[in-house]
Amino acid sequence: MKTLIVNADDFGRTPGVNAGVLEAHGGGIVTSATVMVLEKAAARGIREASERAPRLSLGLHFCVTGGGPPAAPARALPTLAPGGRFRRVPEELPAEIPSAEVRAELEAQIAVFQMLARMDPSHLDSHHHAARHPAIAPVFAAIAAARGLPARAPDDASRRLLRAARVRTPDRFEDGFHGDGVRVERLARILEELPDGVTELMCHPAVVDDALREGSRYAGARDLEREILCDPAIREVVRARRIRLAGFEALAARMR
C-alpha cells in the first residue's frame, strides 16, 4: 500500500500561512501540519484548525533557530539562546549544546502546544531540520520515544537514530516539492513514482502576506505551492495511483 503524509510546515507563523495551510487541506491534499508555537499566529491557527479542519493532524515544529525568543527561561539556555534569542539559521548553532538546554526547550514547546491545542502533538519535526544537529538529535529522539510521539526523519541517518530509540517514523521523506521543484509536473511525478510504504511529503503552502515576506527567506513560492496542492490534476493522480492520504496516525499500527 502507498501511504502519503502531506505535512505543511510553519503553521502558526503568520495569518497568511494559516490560511494557506487550511486551504490546502480543505481543497487539496495536505493532511498534516506542524505548528510553530512561539509565533504570534499560532494560537489563532490552532483555533481555526479546530473549528474548520478537525481532521487536520497537528504536530510540533520544534524551533531553535529563526531569531525569536525561546519558550524556556532564557537563563536556562545560555548556549542555545544567548541573550534570550535563537540564532537565525542552523549554520550558526555551536557544535556543542548541553543536552539539558535542548531538553528544557523541547519540553517547554511541547507544553505550549498542549496549552494551546488542549491535546498532545500528533508528531514532532523541526524548523530548518535543526533536529539533525549532533547535539540535538539524541535528545529529540529520547523525548519523542518517552512520549510515544512519531517524528520526521529527513534522512537515512536520522531515521536510523530515531528507530533505534523506538520512535516511529515514515519510511521515506520527500522534499522535492520545494524551491525550483514547485511545479505541477514535479509533484505529479513524485506521486506517480511513490513506492509502497509510508512517505512524508514536506510542503509550505501559504497565502503570502507582509509578515511572511519580511520574516522568511522562502516566501514567494508558497502561494504557488498552495495552488498546486489544490490542483484537481494532483488529486486525480492520487486517485489513479490509489495513494492513501493520511496523517502521522498512519504509523500507529506499524512496528517501531
Image (cartoon, grey):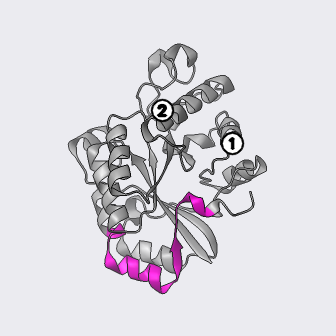
Residue extending farthest right: 164
Asked if residue 8 lies in the magenta stretch, the reply is no
Quarter holding the N terminus is: bottom right
Instruction: Give the magenta-colored segment's residue range.
Output: 228-250
Q: Secondary structure at mark 1?
A: helix
Outermost residue toward the bottom in this view = 240
Amino acid type of the residue that numbered disc 1 sits on in the rendered structure: Ala
Q: Amino acid at mark 2?
A: Val
Q: CA distance from mark 1 to mark 2?
A: 19 Å
Look at the picture and state if 196 lies above or below 25: below
User: Considering only vertical position in the picture, is 229 above or below 51?
Assistant: below
Mark 1 and mark 2 lie on one chain; the one further toward the N terminus is 2
> Looking at the figure, which quarter contains the C terminus?
bottom right
Residue 74, percent across and down? 50, 17
Find residue 141 and name its label. 1
> Is residue 230 inside the magenta stretch?
yes
**Residue to which mark 2 is pinned:** 112
The residue lying at 22 percent from left, 47 percent from top is: 209
Identify the residue at horizontal 64%, vertical 26% (top origin): 97
Specify the principal SS of the magenta part. Answer: helix
Q: Residue at x 35, y 56 (%)?
A: 21
**Residue count near mark 1 (Cα–Cα under 10 Å), binned few <14, some 14–19, many ≥20:** many
